[in-house]
Image (tube, helix red, strand yellow):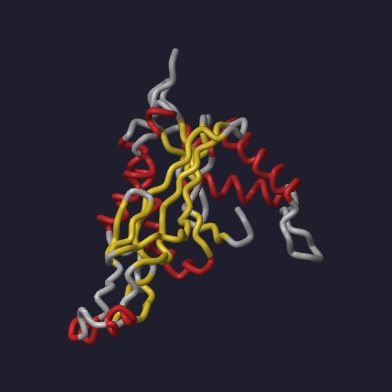
């Protein structure tokens, strides 16, 4: 909900509160309001892939025993609340007014709690991190990924020479993408926060960094990121509430 983040609209429109409440939901099950995955504007062109990632998170939460307020419904509540309260950007400077933003977030939590019985608000986002690499592998947020740091055919021919060392960096940092999940209770207390790495956003090709064209296109990588980000959630927020 930062200005530099684009909220991904999973689908247009949202079911009314009574339609969601009418679903068969066992009593005493923890209800989570799932927001769509937030995406940095630099990666907004990958919206379709991130839509699939949002759906995977929803499925994982349901399989873990939670009742899930769908992301399109949660987003509709946020938009309706934001618009009703007049937004949170300064008309003249375009900057976020923190107090207004906080008021809208608080009002959204109340609307999710009162209208949908939500116990917690799950807010996933894609984050760009500085992944440390060494020896052709980068490691961050529970995964490792190849940098492609052989430098291509030329580096192979020059292997073991000073030119090879210049052509192929042996260590440093490179941008990687992670799935970050934050979970707040309906009073705004942070209950859970964890990230799972997805993949590098660039690879070395013939000694030059080139952007990965579809960083969220691998279902197995996405599934791993979701598992890493959500595996410990049931320990902190039990799927079933105590009597």
Q: In this view, does 240 lie above or below 180?
A: above
Q: In this view, does 180 lie above or below 47?
A: above
Residue at position x 67%, y 50% in the image: 82
- Pick whichever, 145 or 184, lies toward us: 145
Question: Residue 145: x percent and y percent?
Answer: 29, 61
Question: Residue 171: x percent and y percent?
Answer: 36, 66
User: Could you tell me which quadrant the C terminus lies in?
Assistant: top left
Q: Is residue 168 above or below residue 217?
A: below
Q: Quadrant of residue 3?
A: bottom right
Which residue occupies the extreme front position in the image? Answer: 162
Is residue 110 shown left or right of residue 11?
right
Q: Quadrant of residue 237?
A: top left
Residue at position x 54%, y 49% in the image: 75
Residue at position x 55%, y 35% in the image: 190
Residue at position x 35%, y 47% in the image: 226
Q: Is residue 183 visible?
A: yes
Q: In this view, does 201 lie above or below 73?
A: below
How many numbered marks, from 0 up?
0
- Pick whichever, 119 or 39, lies toward us: 39
Which residue occupies the extreme left position in the image? Answer: 157
Is residue 30 shown left or right of residue 150?
right
- Pick whichever, 230 or 208, lies toward us: 208
Which residue occupies the extreme top position in the image? Answer: 243
Q: Can residue 19 be seen in this view?
A: no
Which residue occupies the extreme right position in the image? Answer: 92
Is residue 154 shown left or right of residue 36?
left
Question: Residue 115: x percent and y percent?
Answer: 58, 34
């Amino acid at each position: 909900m930062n200005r530099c983040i684009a909220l991904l609209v999973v689908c247009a429109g949202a079911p009314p509160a009574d339609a969601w409440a009418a679903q068969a939901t066992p009593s005493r099950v923890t209800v989570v309001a799932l927001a769509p995955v937030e995406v940095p504007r630099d990666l907004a062109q990958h919206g379709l892939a991130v839509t699939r990632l949002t759906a995977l998170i929803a499925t994982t939460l349901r399989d873990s025993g939670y009742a899930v307020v769908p992301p399109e419904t949660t987003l509709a509540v946020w938009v309706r609340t934001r618009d009703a309260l007049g937004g949170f950007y300064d008309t003249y400077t375009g900057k976020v007014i923190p107090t207004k933003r906080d008021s809208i977030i608080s009002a959204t939590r109340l609307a999710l709690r009162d209208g949908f019985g939500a116990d917690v608000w799950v807010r996933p986002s894609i984050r760009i991190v500085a992944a440390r690499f060494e020896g052709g592998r980068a490691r961050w947020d529970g995964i490792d990924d190849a940098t492609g740091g052989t430098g291509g055919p030329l580096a192979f021919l020059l292997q073991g020479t000073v030119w090879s060392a210049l052509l192929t960096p042996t260590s440093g940092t490179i941008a990687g993408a992670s799935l970050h999940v934050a979970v707040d209770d309906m009073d705004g207390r942070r209950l859970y926060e964890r990230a799972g790495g997805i993949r590098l956003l660039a690879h070395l090709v013939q000694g030059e960094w080139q952007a990965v064209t579809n960083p969220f296109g691998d279902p197995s990588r996405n599934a791993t990121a979701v598992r890493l980000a959500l595996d410990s959630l049931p320990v902190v927020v039990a799927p079933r509430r105590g009597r």
